[in-house]
Image: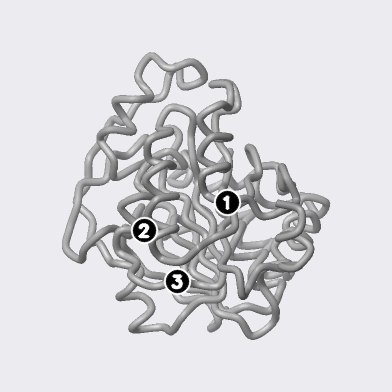
Amino acid sequence: MTATTDTRIAALRIDPVMSPLHRSLDVYYGDPDRDARMDAFYARFVTSGDLVFDIGSHVGDHIGSFRRLGARVVAVEPQPLCLRALRAIYADDDQVTLVEAACGARTGRTRLHVNSTNPTVSTASPDFVRAAKGAGGWEGEVWDADIEVPVVTVDALIDEHGVPTFAKIDVEGFEDEVLAGLSRSLPALSFEFTTIARAVAGRCLDRLTTLGFDGFDVALGDNKSMTFERWLPASDMAAHLRDLPHLANSGDVYCVTGRHQPGAEASTAAV
């Protein structure tokens, strides 16, 4: 981060209007070791000059990593408060394009269920909200407001901005809807899964297989470390996600197509 960016984040941290995001800003900014781990992890997918889609940007720490790796970023985020933070943090970066929308199966509008005290788990999926009620680890989470937001598809983003080398999808149980709006294979992408919505991950894997993705690995929680360090077939990944204990809670599944798999020959031999 630059000194100017540090100053902007410091201002956001003391802005009372931004109080719902103060915890996220503290967690996701200001830790050089975390930044270095994230950069090293994503360097296997992203190089300088690439285009990356960050779908569900929240406060933009992943944008920061992709930019440090030299990528141009299209960041998609529907929450007004998060967008205010993103506009402040990346105000002078012409390589970051902010799209004020949710991502889904078709263009239009949808209802976003907002968790005012924990905006990172706001979601366009009513099923996700229902699944969280009474679930272990989700105690106290309340979705206390609904707002109507525009919806854009990944295909529409590609038509406007080009084909990304990598797309990160983190939209709290709406990942299958995002992938329903993608009709082509990409070199690589990731999607978040949660143990309260395992069926969503299953539908994502089915969709990605249809699109030609054939290698999968997973990183649990916020730990940027692959579980297998080799590319599994979709059936093996589906079985692994089904067997995870509830307390695993969440993670990100990384998905690649064969011709773009980092270390493809070694990975294929290991599977």
Which label sits in the foreground, 3 or 2? 3
Question: What secondary structure is found at the residue carrying circle 1?
Answer: loop
- Examine the rendered structure and indicate whether residue 9 appears above or below residue 91: above
Nearer the observer, 125 or 217: 217
In this picture, residue 107 sits left or right of residue 21: left
Question: What secondary structure is found at the residue carrying circle 2?
Answer: helix
User: Circle 1: is it few (<14), some (14-19), or many (20+) Cα within 10 Å?
Assistant: some
Determine the CA span between mark 3 and mark 2.
11 Å
Which percent across, then down, holds residue 220? 64, 38
Q: Please, what is the three-letter code of the amino acid marked with disc 3?
A: Ser
Q: Please, what is the three-letter code of the amino acid marked with disc 2?
A: Leu
In this picture, residue 236 sits left or right of residue 128: right
As drawn, the label of residue 179 is: 2
Determine the CA span between mark 3 and mark 1.
16 Å
- Examine the rendered structure and indicate whether residue 174 appears above or below residue 96: above
Q: Quadrant of the N terminus?
A: bottom right
Identify the residue position indicated by label 1 in the image.
233
